[in-house]
Each structure stands twice: as structure tokens, then as C-alpha cells.
Amino acid sequence: MCLAGFIILQLVLSMFLSPRFYRYARLVSIIGIALSIVLLSTVQTEPQYFGFKNTIMSDSYTLLFDFVILVCGFLVALLSRGIVKTIKQSAYTFHAILLSAIFGAMNMVSANDFLTLFVSIEILSFSTYFLIAASKGYYSKEASFKYLITSAVATGVFLFGVSYLYGITGSINISEIYEIVSSQEPSIMYSISSILIVLGLIAKLAVFPFANWIIDVYKGTETSVLAFLSTIPKLAMFGILCRLLVFPLSSTFELTFAVAIMSLVTALWANTYAIREDNVKVILACSASANSSYVLLAACLVSVYNLSTVIFYLICYVLMNIAAFAFLNMYGDRNPMGVKSFKGMFHKNHGLVAAYAVVIIGLAGIPITSGFIAKIYLFTAIANSGLIFVPFLLALLMLTVVALYYYLKILLPMFEECDKNTEVAVLNPVFSQKFVLVIAAIATVLIGVYPEKLIELCRFIAYNI
Amino acid sequence: MDILLSIPFLIFMPLAVSLLVMSPLFTANEIVVRRFTKGVCLFHFLYSILMLACFDPANPYVSEIHFFGLDWIQSLGVKFVFKIDAVSMILTVLTSFVFLLASFASKLNIRKNHKFYYSMLLLLMSAILGIFTAGDMFVFFMFWELELIPAYFLIGAKWKETEDSLYENAQNAKASAVKFVLFTFFGSMFMLLGILLLHYYNFTSNGILSASFSDIIDSTIPFGIQILIAICLVIGFAVKLPIIPLHTWLPDAHTNAPTPVSMILAGVLLKTGAYGIYRFNWQTMPESFMAIAPTLGILALVNIIYTAFVAYSQTDIKRIVAYSSISNMGLILLGLCAYNQIGLSASVFHMVAHALITCGLFMIAGIVYIRCKTRDINSLGGIAAVMPRLFGFSVLIVLASIGIPLFAPFVSEILTMIGALNSDLSDVIKYVSVFSLPLLILSSCYMLKFLHQGFFGGLNPEFEKANDISVHEFLVLASILAGLVIFGIFPDTILGMFS
């Protein structure tokens, strides 16, 4: 609610303030998000709270997701300096949209009603279209349009599934549907509707068959927006998806198998696509898609244990991803993004490149980073789901070898030595960017060395859902 | 005395020093960094000797680290636990010794980026020690993966000023480092699958949520699953060991790495694979190991014979040594496959002997390369005349490597054969043992070829001004030779720990 207030404040400010004060837009957002984080602690979680005529719920699960989303939003807002500078006069609008996207994402996780869920998805998606299109140039418009079309199709699929579900149960309230469904035998219509709903939701995660938007969108989008795009919608989608999978859609075998196949195909596609790519943004896009598919595979093999691994993985993953984009943000969007143009950077910026290296190593899943623990923890979940999923697990493990190759491709040129003739890109970081990168890198290492507390938290949340 | 002997100190001391050396506060002065590292390695070696002296095989060292009163990943039953039994103890001391040699050998081979080099060296040391002492599968796996980072840089980074003619070398080094990392990662993903399954089935069959080696009871796990797990694990270790056909990274990595790194790779890194097979398959899952041992024995035979022929056809000294390493690792694997006490002790003994041999041979290759700028035995020749001391060492080490009595490899090779012949598992192992005897002939073929073409014959006038070995190199070669002779005359120093 607080966030909604600040959205309105931003809008009002955008109308009345002269563009000269564009700098303060970021500040207002940051304060708004920080205040929301503080207010989050007052939210009632025990017992579950249902508000607005049972359309919104909150418990410790939603609280955790809201918290992580807000933290990501906070970091993204910190990174938005560059883009705000280029679009000056609409800075307030940009930030209002960013806040509304965060609002939509939080609302999504808390939705207890398919209608609310739909509206929140749309809030998030519409905001995202604008955020992608915010930076100047042809490619961002193209990216935005691509994203719009895919999202629209996916939303259609989602609504189609919901309509079936409504036809079966006569309700759109998630808890009511759960009660009705659990009392009757699962029918084939029910399986179809649940597959459609999941399909609609996972489009934003860039999972097959809705995967190929991600390449162009990442190519054309500004890095601070990418830091947003690769974290917040993903968190929100997985947040609601896991709840839906645990409750009303609780797994029919068809659903599990369909999702498992989709995630495997995605992992295969994303990892192999990235091998011949040269653009760092595109490689990270493929990595985002691949990571979604790993999480999705664990999430679809529904169990409380898996849920805790999914939450843990997501938290580790968003931190690393934001840090990676923070580094690219420092590097600057105007510069070429080919891996070769990063050549030799380590020798000019030891600390920052080292932090970036830690993060990329974490994404590849090498100790002593959180990525290593998260991968192992997630893969235990898949291994525990029965022998039938061992081939899936083996395929994923082999694909992480491929993934290591392209992560090395990003990383290694930076450590290369160049002769005096070649120009080495120099970073011009400001404090906020350094702050984001360093904080996230430190968190990555800390969780990697001492994961137990966070794992315990995730288990607590998962068991209380 | 017990208070002084701390396993975490043994393992994490190099890590801490590595971070210290890497930090910008530490001096960049080449000499200081090098001497400091040498001192640390020497101290570490003495410390491990002290631990060895106080070691009682019946009463292994165990140490567990808690994080704020909790286990490392309590929810998975993963404890940060270290355990040093006889095999671990021997390999720990060996690791410490090889790194000491490598730090001494680094002087002439490493010409730039000293801080980075020595910190990576120490980091690798920490990782390998962690592998040899881990008492928990996940801790083992963590160190296994951790070793990739320093190993990559040590193989692939540039440690010399590039001249134009050597540019291709640098590119090759980078490519072979990537190859090494990808191969190892490929294997370790199989290994992870095996570990995950073992962890899960141990939990469902025995109700123990733990990943410690001592908590795993394999007999209750369904046999098919056991075989699946064992195969996954063996593929992981086969990359490191290496077992044909997963060996192709090895000659490249060994050839392109600088000399001290080649010494470490062949000396201890390969042994992590054999150690993994011992720790996981041999010790923890004996039932499935007995089932797959004959197959592994045949693979070991292929290793021994095939690579010996390949080594004979090589002309680069380092490649000869690299292929002979694969051949010898086959012998180590054969010792493990025998699945009896003689086989095991022979296998560990051969790990030590082979580590010393390859360190010596790579050292010789490095010395020759620095002096003559080539490692091709066809273009060498006659250098015995200008480097008599190097020649003396080369003759002794080569003779040791082909299994002449009085040197350690003689004992270990013979013992391995005896162990395999005494194997109760299957006749296959016995046949393998018999058929692997030609190794002794083949190894003398390629080793003597190397000695003959490299050192005898007419002296190429280009090499007339080559210097003989320096004090550093003399120390390294002499200590290797001393080790070979001591273990050759008193094999009971190692074998006694297994009785």
C-alpha cells in the first residue's frame, strides 16, 4: 500500500516538477522502497491473513517473496542512474512505472484469486513493456514489442486455462478451488487447465515454447532494466507458480511430466544457443532462461522439500544476476557488448572485476559461492524425486558443463593480457553501482561459505505454506 | 602434542596465505614473494611430517568444523568434517612435498605475475589437501570443484614474457586449460549425480541423513542403484585419473603448463582421481566395486599398454612423460581393482613413487627446455657433454622409472602385480596382471629412447653454451632421488602403515 502511495507521489511529481529535478526521482523511489521494506515487518503473517474480500492473502511465504522483491527493487533503483540521465524529462514516469511493476509483482505473489492474479500480471507486464522501451533507440522499442506480443499470447493461454478451471469448479478463488478440487477425482479437463495455466505463467520465465523472445529483449534493453527484468518478474512468477503447484494444481502426473519436458527442452536450447553467442547480454539471457528451467524442473516435482530448494536457489540467483548487470551497468550500455571488448579489464579494475568474476563463477556453480550450494541443493531435490527423473538430472548436469563453457567465455577475456596497442575498457563506477555489485558479491560468497541459516529460513517458509 | 596437530590448520593455512599473498597489501617484490612461499611450503611440509610422526593408523585423525554451533548444511546432513587415515596421511605428506618441490622449481619458470602465481599455487594446495582429507562427500566435492579455479590459471595464464615465436604456445596453453576445466567439470557432474543418489538412497534405505563416508552403509541399497552410483562416480574420477578414453586433456595440459605446474598436475592432481576411487568405491561401496572391478581392471590394462605405445611414438619430452603418467596411473588403478590389502598398499606406494618420478622427469624436461628452448628429442642430442650433472640425475631417475631394484617403483610395480595375482575377485584381474607385465619392457623402451636421443649422440653446436643445473634445480632433483632411494630400500615406511 505504501508503495502504491509512492507511485501516485511520483506521478504527481512528474506532472508538476520541472525536468531539471530529474535527479530526485531515483531518490524518491529509493525512499519509497526502503519505507515499504520497513512497513513489511508490520504485516500480519500468523495466522494467514486474507484481505480485500479474500482476494489477497499474506503469510510468511508471501512475506519472504515480497521482501526479496523489494530488495531487488531497491538495488535496481540504485542502478537506474544511467537511464534516468538519458531520459531526463520522463525520469519520474520511469520511476513511477518501476514502482508499479514492483507493486504488481508483490501483488502477484499475494494473490488468492485468479482475477487478482490476472490484474497483477498485467500491471507487472505493462510496466515492463514501458521500462524496456524507456531507453532511446530502435532496439529497445523492438524488444518491448516482442515482449508485449509474447506476454499477450501467454496471458491468453493463462486465461484460457483459468476459464476451464472455472468451468470445473465454479470459482476463481484459489483456496476455494483447492477445497473443491481436493474433494473430487482429478479429471482430464483439470489436467489440461492446469497445464494451460502453468504454460501461461512460465512464458515470462522464458521457458519453451515461449523462450525465444528473451534473446532480442535482452539485446535491446538497458542494463538496469535488465537487472529488473531478470529478477523481479521471475521471483513473482515462481512465487505464485510454486503456490499454485502446491495447492490447487497439485500435481497430476501429466502436468509434472509436461513441465519437466518443457524445462529440459529450454535448458537444452538456452545452453546450446549461448555457445556460439558473443554478446554478453545474450549469454546472460540464455543463462537466465536456463536457470529458470532448472528451477522449474525442481518446482514441478512438487514437494515441500523442493519448495525450500527453489526459494533458496531463487534468492541466490537474483543476487548474482543483479550483481552481473550492475557490472554491465558500470561498463555502460553504449559500449559494445561482445566478449572481446572486455579484454584485459582485470588489469585496470582489480576489485570490481574480481567481484564480477565471483558472481559469474557463482552462476556457473563453482564453490565457494552461493551458486554452488544452490545448485547442489536444487539437484538434491530433483534426485530425491525418484529414479524416473535421474535422466533429467543427468541431462541438466551435462548442460551445466556447457554452461560453464560460456561463463568462462564471458570471464576469461577479462583476465587476458593485452599489448600496449589495444584499448582496454575502463569502468567509471559511481558509488551506488559499486555498492550493488560489492554487496551482492559479498552476499554470494557469504551464503556460499555459510548457507545453513538461509536454508533453514527457506525450509521454515516452505513448511509453513 | 595433540593440540598442535590441527587438520583445519593443515588445510586452510595455504588458503589463508594465498589470500594474504593475493591481497594488495602484500609486497609485489618477486624475491620476497617467492621466498615467502617457499618458507610456507617448507613449514607446511615439516608440519605434515610432524603429523605423520604422531600418526597411529588404528586411530585416524578426525576433525569437524561447526559454524556457530551448526553443521555446514545441516538440513542435508552435510558436516564439514575431515578425516585422515593411513592413505590420506601419506597423500597429504606427498602433496606437501610436491608443492615444496614445485615452489623451488618455480624460480626459473615463472617470470611475471609472481603474486598471482604463488597465491594460485597455494590455493591449489589447499584444494588438493581438502580433497585428500575430506570426510564428507559434499566437502570432497566442494574441494574437487574449487581446485578448478587455480588449476585453470596455473595452466592457462601467461607466466613468461611473450615473444612472438611463443605466442602460439600461450594460445595453446589457454585452450588446454579450458579443455582441462571442461573435462573435469564434465566428470564432476557425473560424480555429483552419484553423490546425490548415494546420499538419497542412503537416507531412504538406512534412515541416516548424512553425507559422511563413515555413515554410508551400502549393503541395504538396491544393487542396481549401487551399480548406477558406482558407475557415475567412476566416470567422475576417470577424468582425473585418467582412464582412456577420457584422457585427452592430460597430454595437452601437461605439455603447455609451466614446469612446476606440470609437476603438481602429474604428481598429485592425478592422484586425486585414484584417491576418489579408493575413498568412494573401494572403501565406501565395496559391494558395487567388486562388481565393476574386473571391467575397471581391463580399462587399466588398456591404459597401461596403449599409452605406453603412444609414449614411445612421441618426440616431445613432456608428452612422453605425460603419456607415461597415464600408463602408470593404469597400474595404480589395477592395484585398487585387486581389492585386497596388498593391492591397496601397492597402489598407494606407487602413487608416491610415481609422483616422485614424474616430478623428476618434468623437472628435467623443464631444465632442458630453459637451456635449449626445445623439448623435441630429435633436435636435442649430446647435451650430456655440457650438462653432466643433469645427465647423472636423468640416468638415475629414468632407471628408477623403468623399475630397477633399489628404487621405489620397483617395489610398487612388483607389489601391484602380486596384489592383482592374489585377487580373489575374478580371474580377469589375474589375467590383466599377467598381461600388464610388458609395461616394464615398454616403459624401458620409451624412457631409454628419451635418454638416448636426448643426451647421447653428437652435440648440436647451438647448445654448447648451455649451463649445467643450478643450486635450486640440484636441490629439487636430489631430494626426489633421495625419496626414491629411501622408499626403494625401506618400503616398509609406507607399507607398514597398512598392516
Image: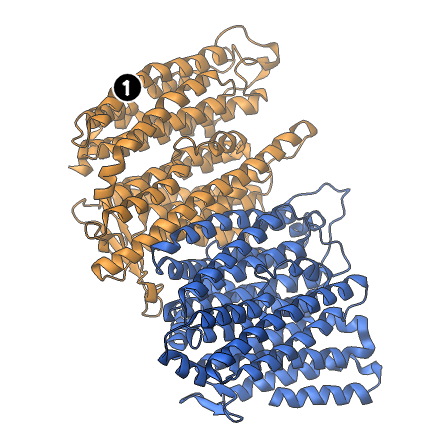
Chain colours: A blue, B orange
Q: Amino acid at mark 1?
A: Phe
| Side of A221 relative to A72 (left or right) | right
Residue at (36, 81) in percent of width and height: A183
Vertically, is B408 above or below A324? above
Question: The C terminus of chain B lies in which quarter of the figure?
Answer: top left
Vertically, is A243 above or below B108? below
Vertically, is B369 above or below B226? above
Residue at (62, 34) in percent of width and height: B170
Q: Where is residue A61 shown, x and y percent of the image?
A: 45, 79
Q: Nearer the viewer, residue A217 or A414?
A: A217
Q: Where is residue A5 shown, x and y percent of the image?
A: 66, 90
Task: Residue under label 1, please give it.
Answer: B435
Whether residue B235 can be seen here: yes
Vertically, is A307 above or below B369? below
Q: Where is residue B161 shown, x and y percent of the image?
A: 64, 35
Secondary structure beneath disc 1? helix
Residue at (76, 90) in percent of width and height: A12
Crowd rating for badge 1 (residues with CA inside 10 Å; few <14, some 14–19, many 20+): few
| Side of A155 relative to B219 (left or right) | right
Identity of the residue furthest to the bottom in this view? A53
Residue at (30, 24) in percent of width and height: B409
Q: Chain of mark 1?
A: B
